[in-house]
């Protein structure tokens, strides 16, 4: 069975599990919010994985795109009463356009300088939000962000709304992951991976490196914008502080799960979605905990949890094959012996 087929089976099993899981948990806002957070974390980690795992472009400020999507949606719906569909599309497009600006930086900066530039992007965006209080309500954030209004679900009670909203966000997350899968295994995806291995060699093979960097930055940022809108609808409140702390978390998801794979960021999203609940006693030090986790993963599982599972599976298979060969050898020798 091929590795790709194994990945598809694992993904299908994960989807079935996520569909059944809400029916096995108490139908309370607390548990459903954790599941919803997994959905937008899965979108975020998959979007950063496209940029870093498959193209090799380092971004330490991916939460900026999430922030732009969330604030665009919140400002247009809450402040100006613009219809939700237009606000959602506008939020995604604003994040996409900011991603194209990052694409300009990708084409001119090397890895370490690009990482510094993306960190500066988050800081600059946060400063803009705080200073332009007439538009963004400054450091106080925007409360009472409108919930999703389709099929009348916005009129339901919080627990019932969240239960339905979870399946909607899960569907969006699945579509995003399928899109990433199709993109990675397309001609464009092969160009991304060639750029990651060597931009110079890719250019020598007639691959327009700058064009593909623009494409991946735009797609990645647009996906993060989708996650930001889901976050704003779910939490119903956004502030610059929430997004300042998000970049480290998104990076941790990719590293923990395993960059350069489709399933890896999803595993990382599950782990990082659950960790804050498991580490409530040290909630004020979460970023430090995530940093320690990244260091430990790099030391003991350089290819992430998914890579560690695959290496363990190969090791166990090799041991079993060797043991089978040892037990078969005496029988073969006996069968070839003289009468």
Image: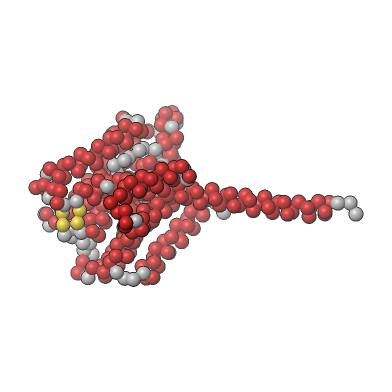
Residue that protrudes farthest toward the front in the picture: 281
- Residue drawn 28% across the image and 38% down it: 118
**Splitting the image into 4 quarters, where does residue 107 fall?**
top left
- Front one among 206 and 318: 318
- Residue drawn 16% across the image and 42% down it: 128
Q: State whether residue 143 is above or below residue 107.
A: below
Identify the coloring: secondary structure
**Splitting the image into 4 quarters, where does residue 155 fall?**
bottom left
Image location (x, y in percent) of residue 9? 49, 58
How many marks the image carries: the answer is 0
Image location (x, y in percent) of residue 99? 27, 41
- Front one among 273 and 178: 273
Image location (x, y in percent) of residue 90? 21, 50
Q: State whether residue 291 is above or below residue 209.
A: below
Q: Quadrant of the N terminus?
A: bottom right
**Splitting the image into 4 quarters, where does residue 114 fall?**
top left
Residue 281 in view of the camera: yes
- Residue drawn 20% across the image and 53% down it: 238
- Residue drawn 31% across the image and 53% down it: 282
Image location (x, y in percent) of residue 315? 58, 49
């Amino acid at each position: 069975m091929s590795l790709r087929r194994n990945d598809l089976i694992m993904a299908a099993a994960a989807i079935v599990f996520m569909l059944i899981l809400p029916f096995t948990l108490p139908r309370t806002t607390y548990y459903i919010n954790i599941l919803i957070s997994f959905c937008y974390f899965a979108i975020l980690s998959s979007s950063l994985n496209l940029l870093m795992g498959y193209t090799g472009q380092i971004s330490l400020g991916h939460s900026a795109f999430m922030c732009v999507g969330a604030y665009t949606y919140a400002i247009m719906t809450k402040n100006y009463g613009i219809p939700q569909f237009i606000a959602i599309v506008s939020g995604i497009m604003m994040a996409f356009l900011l991603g194209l600006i990052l694409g300009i930086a990708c084409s001119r900066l090397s890895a370490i300088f690009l990482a510094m530039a993306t960190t500066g992007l988050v800081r600059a965006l946060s400063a803009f939000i705080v200073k332009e209080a007439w538009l963004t309500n400054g450091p106080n954030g925007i409360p009472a962000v409108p919930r999703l209004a389709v099929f009348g679900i916005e009129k339901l009670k919080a627990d019932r709304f969240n239960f339905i909203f979870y399946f909607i966000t899960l569907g969006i997350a699945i579509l995003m992951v399928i899109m990433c899968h199709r993109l990675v295994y397309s001609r464009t995806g092969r160009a991304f991976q060639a750029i990651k291995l060597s931009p110079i060699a890719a250019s020598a093979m007639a691959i327009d490196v700058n064009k593909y960097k623009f494409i991946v930055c735009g797609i990645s940022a647009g996906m993060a914008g989708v996650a930001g809108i889901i976050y704003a609808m779910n939490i119903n409140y956004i502030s610059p502080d929430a997004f300042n702390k998000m970049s480290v978390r998104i990076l941790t998801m990719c590293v923990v799960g395993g960059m350069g794979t489709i399933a890896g960021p999803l595993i990382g999203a599950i782990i990082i979605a659950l960790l804050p609940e498991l580490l409530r006693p040290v909630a004020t030090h979460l970023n430090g905990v995530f940093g320690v986790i990244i260091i430990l993963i790099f030391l003991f599982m350089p290819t992430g949890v998914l890579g560690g599972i695959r290496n363990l599976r190969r090791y166990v298979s090799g041991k079993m094959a060797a043991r089978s060969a040892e037990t078969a050898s005496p029988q073969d020798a006996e069968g070839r012996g003289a009468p």
